Structure formats: structure tokens, C-alpha cells
Amino acid sequence: MPPGFFTQPIIDLSRALIGCELLVDGVGGPIVETEAYEASDPASHSFAGPTARNRAMWGPGGQVYVYRIYGMHWCLNIVGGVEPGAAVLLRAIEPVRGPDIMAARRGTDDPRRLCAGPGRLCQALGVDARQDGLRLDTPPFALLPRSGEPPIVTGPRIGITKAAERPWRFGLAGSRFLSRPFPGA
């Protein structure tokens, strides 16, 4: 990725990741949905400051923050932004590379259900706590730049109760691989 890519404001980074291709051990596809979180955001894991769980959020941009939600699903975030404690939650990708591997991991061959949602995305890509804190520019990860400026839709974040009204969810307009449709799109 170009210099400074991960240190741009977290909202800008969240939008800039739409269309970039994420690979884990060669399996993945273009990112089609993201959400932004920062330390001043009451919905963010970093809002109360650094902890053992969110340690990766306080590290340098370009590393990943992986956490478990509801005791069963892993969620993958890309650390970045201008200030420490910010990250972009990856909500969905289009399953382009290694769809058979993703289908075997997920137990479904419906391409629209392989990576639509943070938990599904992590299961399909084989992401869990072992990757927490790793860099995106080293194996097993690869993040490839997008070509061109894709059409992006914006809306409120999903599944949170604090600061839920903030329009910090971004998606590839017209994608059939989103976790949920955007209101009014």
C-alpha cells in the first residue's frame, strides 16, 4: 500500500479499503464493507483505553486487531488512523480467491453467505486469535490496492447501541456480498 495509507483519518481509511483485495494465505477477495471506530467513539473497544484485549488497536497502522464476539465469532479489524486506538472492522468481502476453501470452512457453497458479516468473513478466511497483532504486509496476509475509485454507499453501523447513528459504515454500491443492505441504497 502507498506510504501513509494506514495513517489517514480512520473514516477516510475505512472508505479507502473498499475495493482493496484482502488475502489470507492466498484466500480472499475485494473488501466490500467496512466500519470505522476510534478511541473517542463510545462504541469502540478502545474507548476506555488500552487493555490486554485491545492492545493491537494501540499499535502501528497496518496491523490487525482480532477479537471474539459473543464467545463464538472472530472479527478482523485493520488498525490505522491519525490517533492511536482506531481501527476499521471488515464486515464483508467478495469471495473471489479460494471459494472452495472458504465453502469448506463455512459449510456452505452459497457465495453470498461465505463472507457477508464479520464472523463469516473470519471463518471463511481462517482468521482467529493467532493473527491478532500481525502486520498486513507479511504472511499470511496480503492487502492489494484497488484499481480506480469505486462507488461507495454510507450508512449507520450495525449491531451496536452506543453512537449507532454515526454514518461510519461503508460499502461497495451495488455489491451483492454485503452483510446487510444499506438504508435507501
Image: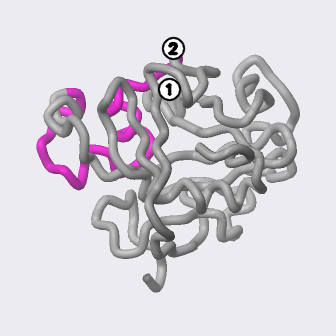
Q: Which residue is mark 1?
A: 71
Give the residue number, with chain letter if any, for mark 2: 130
Sequence order check: which comes first, mark 1 or mark 2? 1
Q: How many marks?
A: 2
Q: Nearer the viewer, residue 9 or 171?
A: 9
* Image-quadrant location for residue 178: bottom left
In the image as oriented, which residue stretches furthest toward the bottom?
184
Estimate how packed mark 2 is, as few (under 14), some (14 to 19) or many (20 or more) residues with alpha carbons within 10 Å.
Answer: few
Q: 137 or 77: nearer the eye? A: 137
Residue at the farthest front position: 2
**Secondary structure found at label 2:** helix
Three-letter code for the amino acid on which mark 2 is drawn: Arg
What span is in magenta?
105-130
- Whether 10 is among the magenta residues is no
Could you say where residue 185 lies in the image, as x and y percent from the top left?
43, 82
**Residue ID at (52%, 36%):** 76
Image coordinates of residue 35 in percent, x first then y, are: 59, 55
Measuring 40% from the left and 49% from the top, which residue is drawn there? 117
Relative side of 78 to 28, left or right:
right
For mark 1, give the secondary structure.
loop
Q: Amino acid at mark 1?
A: Gly
Q: Residue 154: percent from the left, percent from the top? A: 56, 73
Instruction: Look at discs 1 and 2 and give the one toward the viewer.
Output: 2
